[in-house]
Amino acid sequence: MFKKIIALAISAGLLFAASAHADEADVKKAVESVLGKNARVDSVRKAGVLGLYEVVVGGEIVYVDEKAGYLIFGNIVDVKAKKDLTEERKLKLAQIKFSDLPLDLAIKQIKGNGKRIVATFEDPNCGYCKKLAKELVGMTDVTIYTFLYPILSPDSLEKSKNIWCASDKAKSWNDWMVNGSAPAAAKCDASAVDKTVAFGQKLNIRGTPTIFFTDGSRAPGYMPVAQLEKAIAAAGN
């Protein structure tokens, strides 16, 4: 995405038709005029540092100066506070409304009282997903919603549909992910898998596993069980 933004900006000469003292609306209009319809400007806001504006384009963050004359790529780090301000914003922007997740499309597992809740998007051929599955075996008092998100290969899609069509989806999933026993070939209406992939793309999920917590925050990648426990507790609070 960044390469496309850079190419578009360079082809336009990086010259924005903005006023000397731009506001959010001016900046948005200027960026859109340069990048054109090939890029989607999601939002514009003051970054709060260096007089810059934060511009979200296609889910990615870039910065523009106050006069809207230059695009700046990269992360802003507050050295004194030891904070990566750009990463913090990315995590904030990646949040969702947990209740919007189509839980009927997920494999549901209840462990113990099931009071704690977590949702994951996983590919059956993802090595880190298998590592996560082994971690989840030892967790208690949690409800796990696993969305089949086959994005790695055609075989991932085939395995996902076989797992979805199994008489016991959770068992079939764990047999493969934890024990290495491949799901038996099965046929049914597996459109839920295709719907999950389409939904995941809308959420800009680019890798597996991706974990969502009840406060809407996401973790893009594997987490060891101790870290996962802390994240679930934090979301619950």
Image (spheres, grey):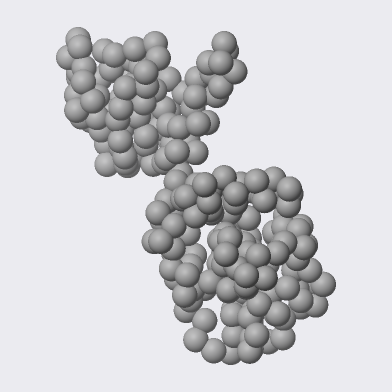
Question: Measuring 42% from the left and 51% from the top, which residue is drawn there?
Answer: 96
Query: Is 144 rendered above or below residue 201?
Result: below
Can I make out residue 156 in this image? no
- In the image, taking residue 163 as reference, residue 178 lies left or right, namely right
Q: Please say if 32 is above or below 40.
A: above
- Residue 130 screen position, x and y as percent: 74, 61
Camera-side residue: 219 or 34? 219
The residue that appears at 50% across and 20% down in the rendered structure is 76
203 is higher (above) or lower (below) than 139: above
Q: Nearer the viewer, residue 128 or 91?
A: 91
Q: Whole-percent x and y of residue 35? A: 31, 33
**Camera-nearest residue between 117 and 85:** 117
Query: Horizontal and vertical percent for residue 220?
Result: 59, 47
Residue in view at x 57 percent, y 45 percent: 234
Q: In this view, does 167 lie above or below 24?
A: below
Q: Which residue is drawn at 67% across and 70% down?
A: 112
Total numbered badges shown on the rendered structure: 0
Answer yes or no: is residue 104 visible: yes
| Image position, residue 59 (x, y; %) | 41, 41
Say whether residue 27 is left or right of residue 199: left
Q: In which quarter of the image is residue 83?
A: top right
Which picture quadrant has residue 71?
A: top left
